[in-house]
Amino acid sequence: MSTEKDFLLYIEGLGVSFDGFKAVDGFNFYLNTNTVHVIIGPNGAGKTTVLDLICGKTKATDGSVKFKGSEIRGLKEHEIVRAGIGRKFQNPSIYENLTVLENLEISHPKGRGVFGCLVFQRTPDVVERIQSVAKDIGLQDRLDTEAGVLSHGQKQWLEIGMLLMQNPELLMLDEPVAGMSVREREETAQLIRKISKERSVIVIEHDMEFVKEIADRVTVMHLGKILAEGSMEHVQHDPKVIEVYIGH
Ligand code: ADP
Ligand code: MG
């Protein structure tokens, strides 16, 4: 029998109520390493709230969240980041007036702290990490470009890169391809496949073609609960899923 120690993330009975309304209810989730797990479901299903609960932005009212075998429910957001969980929100939060290189640099764990980037040492290992991340996100030729002039897609990739600078074991992306062109979606799918070789990635997404390309496993949420779970092939033929989601 597998136990919680066999999983990177092991969630049981997770729930939160807002003024008596259960936005997430009895949520169970078991995530392996090197896995892309996509959460889909109609608007208001509770998908973003699940990520808020995992990263500590919202406090759970029920359940348990174990990361690498340790309980993280109740930890502060920065403690959860330090434990190895990075989370991207729907709107990119990059520094528009800094260059791509500077954005990546200040996201390096050594770049944080009391004096921030003012006294930051651009050591060889930091430079190497910036170059490797910039290459992964396809911005290796844009290091000196001000982030504000990047395309919408490039800004999204830069934010993913800023999270990768911390080398998280789990990365969570909320609707990463919203507003992207078809070409940018394809590149983002490749990026997610590539980065999942060294970590697990939870992705919330609506674009079913994109989900098919990236997902090892899919969870379908509806009204705060899990409606179905399994391979994309499995969930897309589930009559309940077709009724509440795919059929619309
Ligand atoms: P999804 O991401 O699946 O579209 P959300 O997780 O954003 O859905 O929201 C699920 C439900 O919980 C919605 O009805 C939303 O209005 C509600 N909700 C989310 N966060 C809060 C909050 N902080 N306070 C009150 N209600 C919230
Ligand atoms: Mg959402």
Image (cartoon, helix red, strand yellow):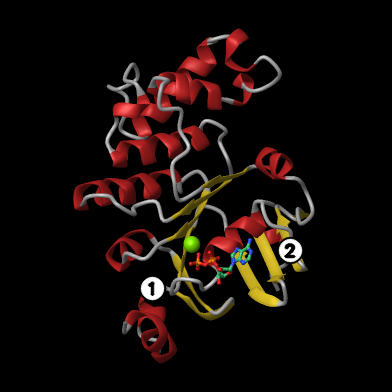
Where in the figure is residue 247, as x and y percent of width and height?
A: 31, 84
Q: CA distance from mark 1 to mark 2?
A: 28 Å
Q: Is residue 94 left or right of residue 248?
A: right
**Tag in front: 1 or 2:** 2
Where in the figure is residue 55, as x and y percent of width and height?
A: 65, 51
Looking at this view, name the residue that lies furthest to the front: 19
Q: Residue at x 75, y 45 (%)?
A: 76
Instruction: Report helix, strand or loop for mark 2.
Output: loop
Could you say which quadrant of the image residue 157 lies in?
Answer: top left
Please name the amino acid that badge 1 sits on: Met
Q: Is residue 136 left or right of residue 16?
A: left
Q: Nearer the viewer, residue 223 or 36?
A: 223
Where in the figure is residue 84, as x and y percent of width and height?
A: 64, 42
Decide: is 72 above or below 101: below
| Mark 1 close to ligand 1, CB under 8 Å | no
Judge the density around disc 2: few (<14), some (14-19), many (≥20) Cα neighbours within 10 Å.
Answer: many
Q: Residue at x 61, y 68 (%)?
A: 29
* Marker disc for residue 60: 2
Please name the amino acid that badge 2 sits on: Ala
Query: Is residue 31 in view from this perspective?
Result: no
Q: Quadrant of the N terminus?
A: bottom right
Judge the density around disc 1: few (<14), some (14-19), many (≥20) Cα neighbours within 10 Å.
Answer: many
Decide: is 124 above or below 33: above
Instruction: Report helix, strand or loop for mark 1.
Output: helix
Could you say which quadrant of the image residue 154 lies in?
Answer: top left
| Mark 2 close to ligand 1, CB under 8 Å | no
Q: Residue at x 46, y 24 (%)?
A: 103
* Marker disc for residue 232: 1
Q: Residue at x 48, y 37 (%)?
A: 93
Q: Quadrant of the C terminus?
A: bottom left
